[in-house]
Image (spheres, helix red, strand yellow):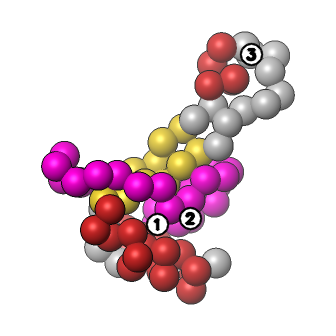
């Protein structure tokens, strides 16, 4: 991923679904990253409110990425 591009979220939800989406985007040559937002799980091992996992792409790839995700879902 280019460090000069703005990163935008194309998915927020479960880890397993984020990995499926990452696979779809990788297969279509769209660079992406999975970011774990589970702050609650880090700050308290007893917390049941883990945050979402995000999939982000370069802003210029967002439209194409969303189309691919919608077709693959």
Q: Is residue 47 above or below residue 50?
A: above
- Residue sitting nearer the eye, 1 or 20: 1
Residue holding disc 3: 45
Q: CA distance from mark 3 to mark 2?
A: 26 Å
Q: Earlier in the sequence, mark 3 or mark 1?
A: 1
Q: Earlier in the sequence, mark 3 or mark 2?
A: 2
Residue 40 located left or right of residue 69: right
Pointer 3 with pointer 1, Cβ within 8 A: no
Disc assigned to residue 20: 2
Q: Secondary structure at mark 3?
A: loop
Q: Secondary structure at mark 1?
A: helix
The percent coordinates of residue 12 (x first, y second) are 61, 53
**Is residue 13 inside the magenta stretch?**
yes
Over which residues does the magenta segment extend? 1-23
The percent coordinates of residue 23 (x first, y second) are 46, 66
Q: What is the quadrant of the C terminus in the image?
A: bottom right
Q: Is residue 43 above or below residue 19?
A: above
Q: Secondary structure at mark 2?
A: helix
Q: CA distance from mark 3 to mark 1?
A: 29 Å
Q: What is the quadrant of the N terminus in the image?
A: bottom left
Disc assigned to residue 58: none
Pointer 1 with pointer 2, Cβ within 8 A: yes
The percent coordinates of residue 37 (x first, y second) are 57, 35
- Residue 51 visible to the viewer: yes
Tell me which corner region of the image, top left, top right, bottom left or bottom right, holds residue 50.
top right
Residue holding disc 1: 23
Residue 9 located left or right of residue 27: right
**Is residue 18 inside the magenta stretch?**
yes
At x 83%, y 28%, the residue is 48
- Residue sitting nearer the eye, 4 or 17: 4
Density class for disc 3 (Cα within 10 Å; few <14, some 14-19, many ≥20) is few
């Amino acid at each position: 991923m280019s460090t000069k591009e703005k990163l935008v979220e194309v998915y927020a939800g479960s880890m397993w679904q984020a990995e499926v989406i990452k696979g779809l985007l990788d297969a279509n040559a769209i660079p992406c990253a999975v970011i774990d937002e589970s702050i609650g799980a880090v700050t308290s091992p007893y917390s049941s409110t883990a945050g979402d996992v995000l999939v982000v792409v370069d802003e210029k790839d967002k439209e194409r990425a969303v189309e691919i995700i919608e077709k693959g879902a």
